[in-house]
Amino acid sequence: MTNFPLKKSEVITNLVHFSQNNLQNYSSNRNFDYGPPHHNVSKISPYLRRRFISEEEILGIILQNHKINNIEKFIEEIFWRTYWRGWLETHPWIYDQYRVHDEDQNIPKKTGIKCFEHWKEELLDTGYLHNHSRMWFASIWIFTLGYSWQSGANFFKNNLLDYCPASNTLGWRWVAGLQTIGKPYIARADNIKFFTNGRFDPQNELKENYIFNDQNSTNGKSKEFISYGEKKIKKYDNLGVILNNNDLSLHQLLKEKRINYKCCLFLKKHKTILINNFQKKLCDDIKNDDQEVVFVNNFEAIYSWLKDKKIKHLILPYETVGNKIFYKHEFLKTITNLEVNYTFYLREWDGNAFPHATKGFFNFKKNIGTLVNKARNYNRI
C-alpha cells in the first residue's frame, strides 16, 4: 500500500510540514535511508512528475520559510528532474537506443542480499524508494547480479509512482557508467551500512571491483533545443484543454488568467494496480475541485468531447522525449479535420531551463539562480 496523500490539499500540507520541520536539515540528512516513511526527504516526486503540483508552487511554499542560499541542495534536487528532461530533449537518440534493447528480467525470489530484497519489496509494496537506495539497487542489479541496465530501467518503470522516462533512463545509464562515461556507480557495503544507519551490512555480498571496459561509448553531440510548442497562453473562443500525466494542473494557468475553457482529463489504465489506483485518486481530486472536468481514456472519446463542446482551439501539455501521448500523426490529423487548432503548451519553467541542459549538471547548475529568479518574476513567488 502506498502511504502517499491523494488530495492536493494534503500534498501541500505535507510539503509545508516538511519545509517547517525537516528542510533545514535536508542537506545533511538527505543521503540517509532510514526506511519508510522517509521523513528526511519530501517525497514530492510522484506529484511533481505529473505536475499535480508544479515546480513554481513548490518554490512558493518552501521560500516562505527559507532563504534560497540556505536550501540550495533541495532546490537543486527540484532542478535535477528538469535537467534530465532537458538533456534527453537534446539527445533523443539515447532514449531510442534504450527502447531498442527494451527487455524485462525475471528476478530470483531470493538473491541472498538482504538489503536488495528489502528494497525490492519496498518498491513493490509502496511504489517508492529513497534516491540513494535506487542507486544502490541499480548498481547491485547491474554489477552484482549481472542483469542489463535496460531491464532494471523497465523494472523501475513498471513499479515507481514517480517514473519519468528521462530521469529513469538516464539515472540507470549513470549507474552503468554510460552517462558520465567510464565512471560507473559501484555500491559498496560500508557505504550502505553507514547511510542506512546500520540497518544493512552486505559485507562480502557485493561485487565491488567492477572494471568499466566500454571506453568507446559516446553520447553524441547535443542538438539545440527547439520547442515545437508555445510558451504563451492566449485567449480564444471555444477553448479546450486536455490534462494528462505530463501535466495535471495546466488548467490552473487558464483559471489564473481568467480565461474561459472546457477541460477533459486523459488517463490510460496502468498495468500495475498500485500506480493505477494512485493516478485515479489524483484524478478524482481534480474532478472534485472542478466538476466540469470530463474523464476520457481513448482518442475516440476525445474526438466526441471536441465535437460535443464545439472546441475550436485546443491546448495540450508539451510532450518531451519518452512522454509522447498526443504528438502522433493520426491523432493530430483527425483533430485538424475536425477544424480544431491545437497548441502544445511549453511551460516557461521548461522553456527557460531546457536550453541550458545540453551538457553535465555542473554546467546546468550555474544557471539555477537565474532560473529561480525568472520563475519568481513570472509567478510572483
Image (cartoon, grey):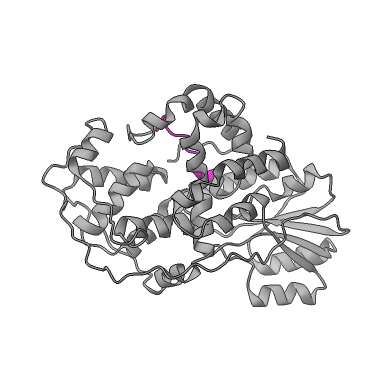
The C terminus: image quadrant: top right
Q: Nearer the viewer, residue 238 or 318?
A: 318
- Which x, y percent locates residue 336? 77, 74
Taking the spot 41% from the left edge, 43% from the top edge, the residue there is 126
Q: Which residue corresponds to the image point at 60% horizontal and 57% vertical from the top-left?
A: 267
Residue farthest along the left direction in this orientation: 204
Q: Specify the quadrant that holds the N terminus.
A: top left
User: For the point 34% across and 47% down, which residue is it?
Assistant: 134
Q: Quadrant of residue 266?
A: bottom right
What kind of secondary structure does the magenta stretch mostly adopt? loop
> Can residue 120 be seen here?
no
Q: Is residue 35 above or below residue 109?
A: above
Residue for point 72% across, 77% down: 333
| Quarter where residue 339 is shown | bottom right
Q: Nearer the viewer, residue 238 or 301?
A: 238
Looking at the image, can residue 42 be seen? yes
Q: How many marks?
A: 0
> Magenta residues?
38-47
Q: Position of residue 170 (x, y in %)?
A: 41, 58
Q: Position of residue 344 (x, y in %)?
A: 69, 62
